Amino acid sequence: MSLTKRLNLGAGRLEKLDPQRLKIFSTSEWVHLGDAKLRNPNNKHLQTVDYQRTDFIAFNYSIGDRLPFQDKSFSFIFSEHFFEHLFLDESISLFIECRRVLVENGVMRVVVPDADLRPIPERLGFPNEAIGYWCPEKHKTRWSIYSLMPALTLSGFKAIPIKHYDKDGLLHDHTNSLDLGVYGGCLDFEVIRDFRIVKRRNSLIVDGIKWT
């Protein structure tokens, strides 16, 4: 397996990507775990996707599930706006699984809504107070830098803050000034430096490094 094999976790469907991000993700370097069915209730414009060019696996996570990969299969894991749809115990269980499938010094980049500390906090019950917590669209965890970093640390990662609001309402953004020295012997600096894969840039972004 290539040393730069990458996992896109909770990918949704690739038809929903913009053309630039679709070009990045539609390569043999990426494996995608996403929705089995395409849902487009708002009739947004969709891309044409050749799923023969990349690996896409239908994915629906329950606590205790084992990811369908061998240990140390990936150099990089990317997840955008997925972990807010899990409860905290589910997230930690999955973080631990992600650590298992990363190589040593591999990196997991977690992008989630900065729910409570941003200038306009996410409203309670997002996206709709009327739907139950059994619904996949429901946000079940309200992440901030003060919860996501401890959750990753508890799961065995060294947590590196990339972009977040603090308790004083100040924005800290290192997307253009990463200290690559903290990543040690990472095998995939190319994708670590490239934030084009992040669609919702005004999000909480934290990297987890798998230390030995």
Image: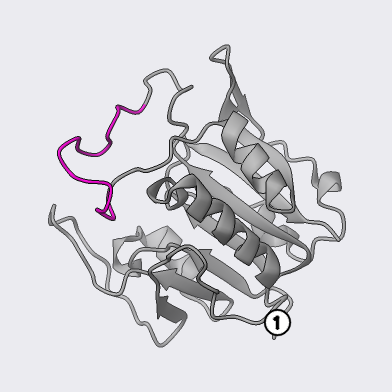
Confirm whether residue 175 shows in the render. no
Q: Residue at x 24, y 39 (%)?
A: 127
Main secondary-structure element of the magenta-colored stretch: loop
> With 207 as the anchor, is 113 left or right in this view?
left
Q: Residue at x 66, y 47 (%)?
A: 152
Confirm whether residue 144 shows in the render. yes
Q: Residue at x 29, y 67 (%)?
A: 15
> With 208 as the anchor, is 21 left or right in this view?
left
Percent x, y for residue 102?
A: 70, 68
Q: Residues within 10 Å of mark 1 (few under 14, many from 20)?
A: few
Q: In the picture shown, does residue 67 fall above or below 91?
A: below
The image quarter in which residue 73 lies: bottom right
> With 9 as the anchor, is 105 left or right in this view?
right
Structure colour scheme = one colour
Outermost residue on the top side: it is 168
Which kind of residue does numbered mark 1 sit on? Answer: Ser
Percent x, y for residue 191?
A: 65, 59
Q: Residue at x 33, y 69 (%)?
A: 35
- Membership of 194 in magenta stretch: no
Give the magenta part as a residue range.
Answer: 122-137
Give the position of the C terminus as an image quadrant. bottom right
Q: In the picture shown, does residue 17 fall above or below 172?
A: below
Percent x, y for residue 84?
A: 42, 45
Name the residue beneath numbered marker 1.
2
